[in-house]
Amino acid sequence: MQRREFISASLSMLLAVPAQAAEPLDDIPIIDTHVHLFDGRRPQGAPYKGSAQWERERGGVALPSTYRPFAKPLNIVGAIEVEASPWVEDNLWVLEQMQGDPLFVGTIGDLEPEKPDFAELLDRHRKNPLFLGLRCGNLWGRRLADQLGDRRFVDGLKRLAEAQMVMDTADPSMDLLQAVLRTSDAVPNLRIVLDHLPGFDPMLQERGAYDAVLKEFGGRPHIYAKLSGVERRPVHGLAANREKLDMMLSVFGEDRVLFGSDWPNSWGRATPAEIVSLARSYFATRSRAAAEKFFWKNSLTAYRWRKRAPNQPG
């Protein structure tokens, strides 16, 4: 199916659904499934310090106490940290930062499944219920497509799936998305969350392959999409993003899309308030049930996090 036909068919299905009356969604609690923690002030520094604007304005520091003032006014009641360091010891550092703040319900860490000590490290980290899974993708000098050629890597992902944990991806590209399908083929019971998929714009020559990948994703119920990476200045707002969001919903449905702010990597492109506003504006014209799934219910299915505070749904 050609891209134009795919989009046309997708939009036709959406238009066939009766429009919902717009309603305020401020009372729906939000689980932010994509934030980063780091502290460039440590003696060893940090391999990542946020967007260039964040590092310049905030000194390369992002801690639970830094995030909470952004979250509370927006009714964000829970957050999942996504790794921002390839250093093994930083998995423990993140867990220690989150332990004292119940706003944080989990982390997606960084371990390399092909390494000889992976099984030991995974078993050690998963003893903490806040450790929810791993991130694999095109980052820190690694490429998922290359790693899949290593039998030890695939075996490590099988161990992750057996532990009922999740794999997030990173830095979407055409080769990464195709590698995700290969990962799904190799480890069919592994839950996979695609990070920042709406922020990926395929080149003209990639569009046929991109449509084919999306079609495959649509038929795999264990693959989820984080609707992060949408808001991008100078063009932002619902009008600029509706078509892409419609496409994501047509592919993944209401049960496999998740909210993620990408804070503070998104700082300079959009604030958490702008990102939440866009999401609420979009889901205000769909059903309230769909909004609740997107803002928090689907995160329970994808990540299986545990409630830590009375105001967190569950």
Image: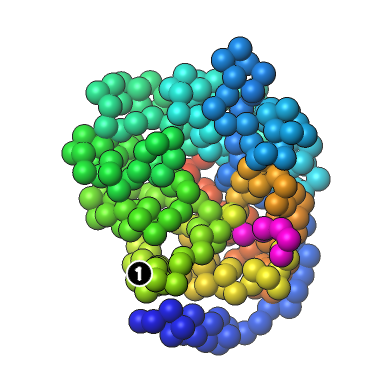
Q: Amino acid at mark 1?
A: Ala
Residue 161 belongs to the span the image colors magenta:
no
Chosen colour scheme? rainbow
215, above or below 274, in the image: below
Q: Position of residue 132 (x, y in %)?
A: 46, 36
Q: To which residue does mark 1 refer?
A: 209
Image-based side of 66 in relation to 121, left or right: right
Q: Residue furthest top?
A: 43
Is any part of residue 61 visible from this angle? yes
As helix, strand or loop, the secondary structure at mark 1 comes to helix
Quadrant in the picture for the N terminus: bottom left
Q: Main secondary structure of the magenta part?
A: loop
The residue positioned 58% from the left and 44% from the top of the image is: 34
Magenta range: 230-235
**Where, by quadrant of the figure, is residue 229 drawn?**
bottom right
* Image coords of residue 114 (percent x, y): 27, 32
Q: Name the residue: 37% across, 74% down.
A: 208
Which x, y percent locates residue 170?
A: 46, 46
Q: Within 10 Å of the Cα at label 1, are there few (<14), some (14-19), or many (20+) other Cα atoms?
A: some
Query: Number of numbered discs present?
Result: 1
Q: Is residue 76 above or below residue 282?
A: above
User: Where 115 sits versus 72, above or below?
Assistant: above
Q: Is residue 44 left or right of residue 117?
A: right
Image quarter of residue 139: top left
